[in-house]
């Protein structure tokens, strides 16, 4: 079995995110590894705002994205403090685009040995029709994936 030195935690700040970070943190402590937290700002949200903001003076989608990154970083840092993971080497990466594609690109760029991500149930119609982000990552990723379900 390959040694796990770098763990990528796919965090979308949903109800699964805390469990994802708990598992990633536990594994990193056991293996003395690093954690790369990846959060993707969905391109669908950015495009919707661009359309909605057309003609609205003073609104900048670019500034909105930057505020999102700041708010998300604060939330992630809160999780890290709450779970006492501050002693671990942690890098946080923000990406913009289609979530499964951006996660796969992050895998290529960051070179993790393992990905930890939440697997949501198939309760929503959109997921049934097009497949979830986790499903698509699982189908295409060459790195082992640990799926975390909410208790």
Image (spheres, rainbow, N blue to C red):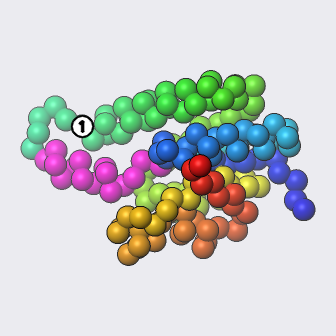
Q: From this viewpoint, which residue is outermost toward the front?
A: 151
Q: Is the magenta stretch mostly helix, strand or loop?
A: helix
Tell me if residue 36 can be seen.
yes
Task: Report whether 113 appears left or right of 151.
Answer: right
Kindly identify which residue carries mark 1.
60
**Residue 56, image x, y percentages:** 11, 39
Q: Image quadrant of residue 81?
A: top right
Q: Which residue is drawn at 24% across and 37% down?
A: 60
Q: Residue at x 43, y 60 (%)?
A: 98
Helix, strand or loop at disc 1?
loop
Instruction: For label 1, count other residues whose C-alpha is less than 10 Å away and answer few (under 14), some (14-19) or many (20+).
Output: some
Nearer-the-camera pick, 39 or 123 = 123
Tell me if residue 10 can be seen.
no
**Residue 70, image x, y percentages:** 44, 30
Please say whether residue 139 is one of the residues in the magenta stretch: no
**Residue 140, image x, y percentages:** 61, 72
**Residue 151, image x, y percentages:** 59, 49
Q: Residue at x 58, y 39 (%)?
A: 18
Q: What range is drawn magenta here?
A: 40-54
Q: Which residue is drawn at 49% across and 62% down?
A: 121
Please say whether residue 45 is one of the residues in the magenta stretch: yes
């Amino acid at each position: 079995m390959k040694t796990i030195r770098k763990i990528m935690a796919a965090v979308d700040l949903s109800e699964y995110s805390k469990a994802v970070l708990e598992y990633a943190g536990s594994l990193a402590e056991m293996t003395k590894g690093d954690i790369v937290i990846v959060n993707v700002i969905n391109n669908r949200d950015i495009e919707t705002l661009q359309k909605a903001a057309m003609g609205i003076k003073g609104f900048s989608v670019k500034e909105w994205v930057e505020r999102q990154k700041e708010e998300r970083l604060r939330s992630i840092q809160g999780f890290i403090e709450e779970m006492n993971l501050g002693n671990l080497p942690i890098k946080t990466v923000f990406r913009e685009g289609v979530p499964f594609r951006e996660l796969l690109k992050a895998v290529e760029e960051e070179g993790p040995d393992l990905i930890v991500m939440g697997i949501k149930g198939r309760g929503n119609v959109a997921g049934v029709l097009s497949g979830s982000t986790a499903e698509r990552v699982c189908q295409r990723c060459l790195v082992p994936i640990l799926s975390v379900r909410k208790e």
